[in-house]
Each structure stands twice: as structure tokens, then as C-alpha cells.
Amino acid sequence: MHAVTGKPSWSWRSPAAPGLHATRSAVGPWQGWSLAGLAALAALVPARGVWAAGLLLLAGLLVIPGLLLLRALRVPGSAIAAFPLYVPAASVVVLFASGLLADLVGPLLGISEPLRAGPLIAGLELSCLALLLAAWRTGPEMEIPWHWPAAPAWQFLLPLALPLVAAGGAARLNNGHSGAAALAAVALCCVAIVGALMLASRLDKTVLVVVLYAVSLALTWGFSLRGDLVYGFDISAEYHAMEQTITAGIWHTSHVKDAYGAMLSVTLLPAELHAVSGISGLLVFKVLYPAVNAALPVVIFLLASRVAAKAWAFAAAAMTVAQQPFFQQMPGLARQEIAIVLFAILAFAVLDRNVPRRAQLPLVALLGLGMTVSHYSTTYFAIAMFAVALPLHFLVSWLRKMPRFSPSMAVALVVATAGAFIWYGLITRSASNVSQFLSAGEGHGLDLLAGSGSLLARYLQGGAAATISAADYARQVQLYYAAHVAYVRPLPGAASRAYELRASALRTAPVRFQAGVSALSRAELIVEQLLNLIAAIGALWLVLSRKTSLLARQIGLLGLGALVILAGLRFSGTAAAAYNPERALLQGLVVLGAGVGWVLDRTAGSARRRGLVVLSASAAAILVLLASSTGLAGAVFGGGTDTNLSNAGWDYSEFDMSTPELAAAAWLGKEARPGQLIYADTYAELRLEAAFGGRPGILTDVTPLSINQQAWIYASRMNVTEDTGMAFFNNQSVSYTFPFGFLRANYDLVYDNGSSEVYSR
């Protein structure tokens, strides 16, 4: 069961790349197929309203441009066969470039709306033809040796039913039915991933990839397909930015203090996919982007399998699948769904020994640029990781036999850093998040181990927002508004004791088996901390061991770079407020997962009995994480579940947007004049952002002493039906009884659809 440190064994045949002096062919079948594919894309665009044509167009957009780019870069076909995810990643890079070309050149040619089907397909075809000409005389080493794996077809098709079951469960919940189908999908996912792990040594590697992808997509769709609009926090503003781009038919470069509008992943790319394939922008966010996100564990598995046997590589990837932020938070972050997968493929390319350097360096550069224009925090993490890994690479080279310098890491660092400076600072001028972080650092310092309780409790809290009482929140808000928001003038009677905020009365499901809930909670905490420890040990082991290959050592160096960032986020409240530590951990697991697989492999050794013990312990740990993170335990033990399994509870009330809520928000957006203040609590604000964007004058502190005398107040479904409000204030969270008594006594109810209300005066 020891790791294989050479080239990977992959069911899609991946022989070593032939020599660079192979005989070259001027014309081959691939040119004809490429031209036919480009012609088919152009021919299908007029029929994009037909769903079958739309699917074919979507598939073509994610395959043909990438194949042409990889061939133009001279990436060997064997490397692509070993890691097929290069193809869609390269296609996304081409779509970014061709869409941006059409967007910038179109107005110069008199085209006022360049992000329409005609200009976009023209730009894409011209870009692809240029790549085709650049790759015209490539040799036979560029041919991709595809072949169907030897495993029976049912082993591939059966796991792919899981996303369909999950989609059906989400649809039933959306239509007011029970969560039985959704619960069945989650249970089947747990069985599939644990069963595949136990049988991993006997299953084809491609089957393991399909299981990982199918389970990841099923769990992700369980959240992303919920609700009448999008599910999640940031995605509400992203959705508005996307809709604005689609409606306007053009994307502008200047986005001062507008980080969402500056990201091509939520503006230009979905507009391009919508215009060319006909798929709606909403489906891009709810269906397609989660399908991209589901590839993240596959990258982790393929990278880990370079240094560990496939069973342990699968275990490491499965632990990523079991992380709740992966399938619950990521669907609410459209820009990061694209960026984190590009980051993962970038990391793989940096380490890929199957790609010659003359092709590797430009590939790394293009993937780095694609990541940069997709998401800022993912890019900052990558910059910091490479910035730590490169000096360590030099230092370790004096202790172990390895080159002093990694050109691919250096290119990744330089391109990401320069790209961030140029794109965020000079072109879009959207780098306000950096200045906000620096200001927070000046004001609060590092805020080490923020929170309350013992040092251990504060460490385990990991920078998460503390909770405060409704009374403390009201008092802090009153003092803050009096000192910093002088233009707000509350009503004279707002300080009456009758209007004091009280603790929330949101109904929660009762716990049926407290002992089970407590035991699972303790087990989850132990597994999470063990995973952190094993990841750290694995990174150090890969770097310092005398028996590891250069590839394994470089993976470990990147892992150490990721660990430095994660430690900073864990201990610094200021850093944690800038980048969610849970999402940072997901990004770090891209390179740390290989270390986890390495430790499991070495611990198991060659003894059959010891290997079975490690395998069983890994399966149990994954099952513990899945039972807690998916809501399966809540369904069994009681205590409530998240939106993927029910139409009740905190998560559902906060993130599931209903049509009546959006209708009320849209009405308010039309009625409120520019400059007028609008109040909505933290989660009600998401409905406003989705309906008409984050306009100035929206305040999220809905308390009697913070509401202006002349203002609009928007109440969401949670406010109306659960009598509950939510707020984040000074990195603290609070739930409170929504002040309807104060509103109804002093303001007029001007809109009411039974689910949402609007007050004014």
C-alpha cells in the first residue's frame, strides 16, 4: 500500500510524452475535426433556444477552445489524458479572452452591445482560428490517447444518478413537499463515498473519479437548486451584477469599490454563456457553476494520487467533499466556484512533471490570469502561498537533493501578483478590500485569538463572529449611530421601554436524542482537529523525508505555504474577517490533501490488517463529517436541518429567497427615491441586493433607536412569519425579535403580500 512516487497510473492511458524531436505532420485529422467543431458552434447559435442545441453549444464551449489552446501551447496529449480537467479550464481562459476582446473592440466598431450572440461568437471563432493556426504544425506527441476504461459501464452510470436524485429532492422541497427524496439523496451519497473508499483498491481509478464528482455535485445541487432565485449570501449581489451585464449587453472596466462587478466570473463569463448557448443566467449560477465546483475534489484526488496509493488519495479527497463549506457555502459564491477550481488546476500545472517547461510556464501564466479575474481572495491566498513556498524551496534545497529554484512557482507568483495589481488596481480600480483590510489592521491590530472564553475555546472558534444579546446589540448600535451616523434622527419615543429589543423567538425543531447529538458533535470536533494535524504532519513529512520524490517535496512546500496562511486566519480575527477561514481551508486542502493521503499511506504500510484498520478509521471519520455537515444527523436525532433537507430553520429563513420576498423588494426599489434611507436586516438585505443591487443608503440595523424618522423599512419572510431579525455588528452576530410593535405604532404599512412587508413614513 505504499505510495507510488513516479508518474500516475490512470485508466485513461497516459504514456510518457515522446521526445520533442518527433516527426511533425503538416495536416492531420485533428485539424478537420477542429474546423468542423467551430463550424458546428457557429451553426448551432441560431438554434440556441432549443434545449438540445443549447446543451451541445455549452459542451462545445467548454471543450473546443480548451483543446485548441492546449495544443497551441504544445501541452502533450499524454498530459491531457492524465489530467483531462486541463481542457475545461483552458476553455474558460479562452472564453474570458474572447469575451473581453469582443467587449472592448465591439464599441470601437460601432457595436453598442458587444455581449450579444453575434459579436461573442465572432470573437470566439476568431480566437479559436488563431489558436488553430498557431497549433497547425504540431507533431504526433500532441495527440490525446483517449480510450474507454476497462471497468463495466454500470460502475460509471450508477453514481451519476445521484445528482439527478438530489435535483429531484430539491425540486420537491421547492414545491412544498417533504424532504424525503432529498434525505434519500444525502444518504445514498454517504453510502456511495464510504463504499467506494472501502473498495478503492479494487475499483478502476476513473470509477473513483466519477464517484467523487457525482457525490460532490449531488451535495452541492442539494443547496444551489433550492429557492426561487439563488441560494446564499454573496451570490445575491453577484446575481444582480450578472443580470445587469446581461441586460446592458456590455461590461465596463471601471468598478470603483465594486469588487463583484470587477470579476469576469460573475459578469462577462455568464453573459457570454447565456448569449451563445441560450442558458439563462440563473441556471448558470444554480446548475453550471456548482457543476464546475464539484470538480475540486477530483483535482485533489488526482494530485494526491501522484504521491499516495489511490485508496488514500481518495480518502483525502473524500474528506474535502465532507466539508460543509464545500457544498453549502461555495454555491453561494459564484465567483469563487470558478476561481478555486482554476487555482486547483493552476497548482496541479505548477507541479505537473508530464508537461515540458516550454508549455508548462505559459499554461501556468494563463491559468493564473484566469484565477485573478475570477476572484480576489482566492488570488491573494495563491500569492501568499507561492510567496512562502518559493523561499522555503531555496532553503530546503540546501538540505535535500533538489533544484534551488522552481520556475513554475515563480511564474505563478509573478503573474498572480502583477495580475492582481493591474486588474484590481489599474483597470477596474476595485481594490477597496485591500484598503479596508489595512484600515482594520491599523484600528484593531491582528486581534489575536479574538472572542471569549479560554485560549482553547478561542482557538477552536477560529475567528468566527461572537454572539451578543439583543440588549447589548441595541445599546452598541445606539452609541455607534450617535457618534458616526449623525444624519440618522430617530423618533422621539424610540427609547421607550415598550420598544426594547428582546431575544429571538425563531422556532427550532426539538432534539429527540440529545446523547447522539452530543456524541456526534464531539466526534466531529476530534476529526476536524485530527485532519488539521495530519495535514500539517503530511506537509512537513513530504518536505523533509529523504525518500520522497521532487514532486512530493514540492507539494509539501506548497502545503507549508498554505499552512502559514491558515494559521494566520485561525489566530487573527482581523485576517479572518477579511477571508473566511472555512473557505480558506478548502483552498488549502488542494495542496494539503496530498499530505493527508501520504500520511494515511505510510501509516497503513504494507501489512493487510493495519491497512484495514486505517481504511476503516478513515471511512468512519468521513461518515462523521458527512452525517453532521449534510444534516443527516439532524434528520435522525432531531434539532433541525439546513435548506437542503427542509423548508424550516435558520438556514432556510436566511438564504432561501421566495418569489413574494423578491416581489416586495422589487416594488421597494421602484418606489424609494435616490438618497432615501432603506432599512433591512442582514439577510433581508440579500433580497434587496438581488432585486435592485446594493444602492447607497441601505442600513442593516433595524432597531428603534437606529431607524431614521423618514425611512423605508423592508421586512422579509423570516421577519414576518418568524418575528425574527438578524444582524452582524462589529464582528458580532445577534438574533432578536423584529420591532414590529414600534413599526406599526409609528410607520405606515405600504406593501404587504403575506410573506413580506414594507413600512414608510
Image (tube, rainbow, N blue to C red):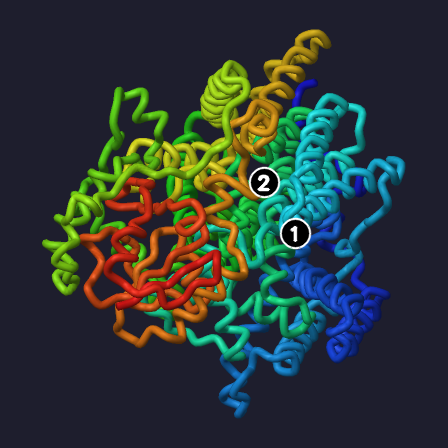
Residue underneath mark 1: 175
**Looking at the rendering, which quadrant does residue 516 occupy?**
top right
Identified at 56% across, 43% down, the residue is 647
Q: In this view, does 407 lie above or below 193?
A: below
**Looking at the rendering, which quadrant does residue 42 occupy?**
bottom right
Q: Mark number for residue 307?
A: none
Indicate the position of residue 324 as horizontal and vertical percent values: 53, 36
Amino acid type, mark 1: Asn
Indicate the position of residue 582 as horizontal and vertical percent values: 44, 37
Residue nearest the observer in this picture, 672 or 347: 672
What is the crowding at mark 1: few (fewer than 14 residues within 10 Å), some, or many (at least 20)? few
Q: Is residue 106 above or below residue 289?
A: below
Residue nearest the observer in this picture, 30 or 509: 509
Residue nearest the observer in this picture, 74 or 671: 671
Question: Which secondary structure, mark 2?
Answer: loop
Left or right of 506: which side holds 697?
left
Q: Is residue 487 above or below residue 557?
A: below
Identified at 30% across, 55% down, the residue is 700
Identified at 63% across, 70% down, the residue is 274
Residue underneath mark 2: 646
Q: Which residue lies furthest to the front in this view?
A: 745
Q: Residue furthest left?
A: 483
Measure the alpha-carbon separation of dots 2 and 1.
12 Å
